[in-house]
Image (cartoon, rainbow, N blue to C red):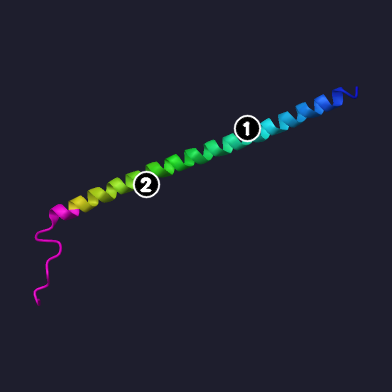
Amino acid sequence: MSQEDPINDRFVDIEIKIAHQEDLVETLNQTIYRQGRRIDQLEAMVAALADHVRTLQSSRQGPVNEKPPHY
């Protein structure tokens, strides 16, 4: 019996380590998923802002850096 206890202890330690690793992997997967969703949102915002800037630039009449009349 004295030989079985160290072996069982080793198996228990391995099972504990695997459980912690599984939890860590799940946490990392959730973090990556959230970051991916946030990146998608930010890309959509950048695209919308770029469209807005293009719209503003095309509707302007005259140069952007026009000097005021008092110069």
Q: Secondary structure at mark 2?
A: helix
Q: Disc 1 marks which residue? A: 22
Give the mark, 1 or 2, whose residue is nearer the N terminus: 1
| Residue found at x 69% / y 33% | 17
Closer to us: 69 or 14? 14
Residue under label 2, please give it: 42
Tell me if mark 1 has few (under 14), some (14-19) or many (20+) residues whose alpha carbon lies within 10 angstroms of its own. Answer: few
Q: Which amino acid type is marked by label 1?
A: Glu
Q: Residue furthest bottom?
A: 70
Is 20 on the left or on the right of 31, as rendered?
Answer: right
Q: Position of residue 10 (x, y in %)?
A: 78, 28
Secondary structure beneath disc 1?
Answer: helix
Residue 71: x and y in percent read 9, 76
Q: Nearer the viewer, mark 1 or mark 2?
A: 1
When asked about the image quadrant of residue 65, the answer is: bottom left
Q: Is residue 23 left or right of residue 30?
A: right
Q: CA distance from mark 1 to mark 2?
A: 30 Å
Q: Quadrant of residue 4?
A: top right
